[in-house]
Image: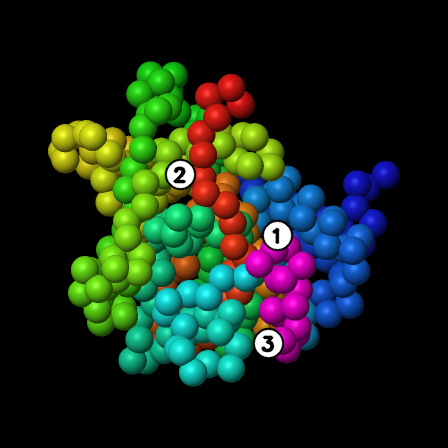
């Protein structure tokens, strides 16, 4: 008997990712929310097809999983500030094509994000996801021991100083760099995982710059292994919901100059920690 009663599960790869089929997110109830959360913890990222959601319904569904974040890149006069619009076309080449976890520059980075497709290129624009628990498990014992008690600094200015047209010092007044463990313990599953990413991680604390760079490069590359990944091909009406604590993602920017428009609603999380006993 299936562990889920409100949808069928079609797994994408052994590493991560599953489509949750035959459910209507506009008509959710407590059981559906509970089962989606369980599927998210099991598969790291879950996908939905053929959903006809308004922006308000998108927000309402996301809000069932926790408080919602407002991203600093959201226009201040936007009616629904919880929605981050990510749009690219002939005048804007996609720039999310790097392996990353969202908003790790926050004191309490997000639990997860729900991304909805609005307009898609005819070909391309897939999103890839990497299971960072599996990436950690594949490390050598020597590297695991080396990184176990290290911390790293995460900095919003590495990406958003240029995108927001602001100086790093101005951004740091509101969003100072944050220090998180290099190896994080997932707060719900208690699994260990790699928690540094090439977008926002700046350096390892109390380590010489060159050694820090080399070690971070080694850890970043773990996400590039296809054996820890899945890849999602978007269609109209598709949504993706990823656990930002246990996976990284990469938006393929192979569709330029075609148009790709998405909307993201992000669920607030908790401050990362490392539990040596986990």
The local secondary structure at tag 2 comes to loop
- The image's mark for residue 46 is 1
**Mark 3 or 1, closer to the camera:** 3
Among the two numbered marks 3 and 1 on one chain, the one whose residue lies closer to the N terminus: 1
Measured Cα–Cα span from mark 3 to mark 1: 19 Å
Mark 3 lies on a secondary structure that is: helix
Q: Is residue 225 above or below residue 249?
A: above
**Considering depth in this image, is 273 or 122 the residue closer to the camera?**
273
What range of the chain is rendered magenta?
Answer: 53-67
Could you tell me residue 275's position as x and y percent? 48, 26
Please give the name of the residue rendered at 62% of the width and 42% of the height, measured from the top-left corner. Answer: 41
Q: Which residue is mark 3?
A: 55
> Disc 3, disc 2: CB below 8 Å?
no
Q: Give coordinates of residue 259: x percent, y percent.
A: 41, 77
* Up-down relation of residue 171 to residue 205 (above or below): below
Q: Position of residue 200 (x, y in %)?
A: 30, 50
**Residue 59 position by quadrant:** bottom right
Q: Between marks 1 and 2, how big is the CA–CA gap?
A: 20 Å
Q: Residue at x 36, y 60 (%)?
A: 96
Residue located farthest toward the right when viewing the structure as drawn: 1
Residue 61 magenta-drawn? yes
The quadrant in which residue 93 appears is bottom left
Which numbered disc covers residue 9?
Answer: none
Q: Which residue is mark 2?
A: 195
Give the mark, 3 or 2, whose residue is nearer the N terminus. 3
């Amino acid at each position: 008997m299936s562990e889920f009663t409100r949808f069928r599960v079609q797994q994408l790869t052994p590493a991560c990712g599953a489509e949750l089929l035959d459910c209507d997110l506009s008509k959710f109830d407590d059981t559906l929310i509970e089962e989606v959360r369980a599927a998210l913890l099991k598969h790291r990222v879950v996908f939905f097809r053929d959903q006809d959601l308004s922006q308000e319904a998108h927000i309402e569904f996301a809000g069932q999983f926790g408080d919602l974040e407002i991203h600093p890149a959201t226009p201040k006069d936007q009616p629904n500030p919880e929605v981050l619009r990510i749009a690219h076309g002939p005048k804007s080449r996609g720039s999310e094509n790097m392996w990353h976890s969202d908003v790790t520059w926050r004191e309490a980075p997000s639990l997860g994000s729900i991304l909805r497709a609005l307009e898609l290129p005819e070909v391309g624009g897939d999103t890839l996801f990497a299971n960072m628990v599996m990436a950690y498990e594949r490390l050598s014992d020597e590297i695991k021991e080396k990184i176990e008690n290290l911390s790293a600094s995460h900095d919003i200015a590495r990406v958003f100083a240029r995108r927001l047209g602001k100086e790093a010092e101005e951004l740091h007044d509101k969003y100072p760099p944050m220090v998180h463990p290099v190896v994080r313990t997932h707060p719900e599953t208690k699994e260990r995982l790699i928690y540094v990413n090439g977008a926002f991680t700046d350096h390892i604390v109390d380590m010489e710059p060159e050694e820090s760079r080399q070690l971070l490069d080694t850890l970043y590359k773990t996400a590039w292994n296809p054996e820890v990944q899945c890849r999602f091909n978007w269609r109209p009406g598709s949504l993706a919901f990823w656990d930002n604590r246990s996976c990284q993602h990469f938006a393929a920017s192979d569709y330029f100059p075609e148009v790709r428009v998405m909307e993201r609603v992000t669920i607030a999380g908790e401050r990362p920690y490392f539990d040596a006993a986990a």
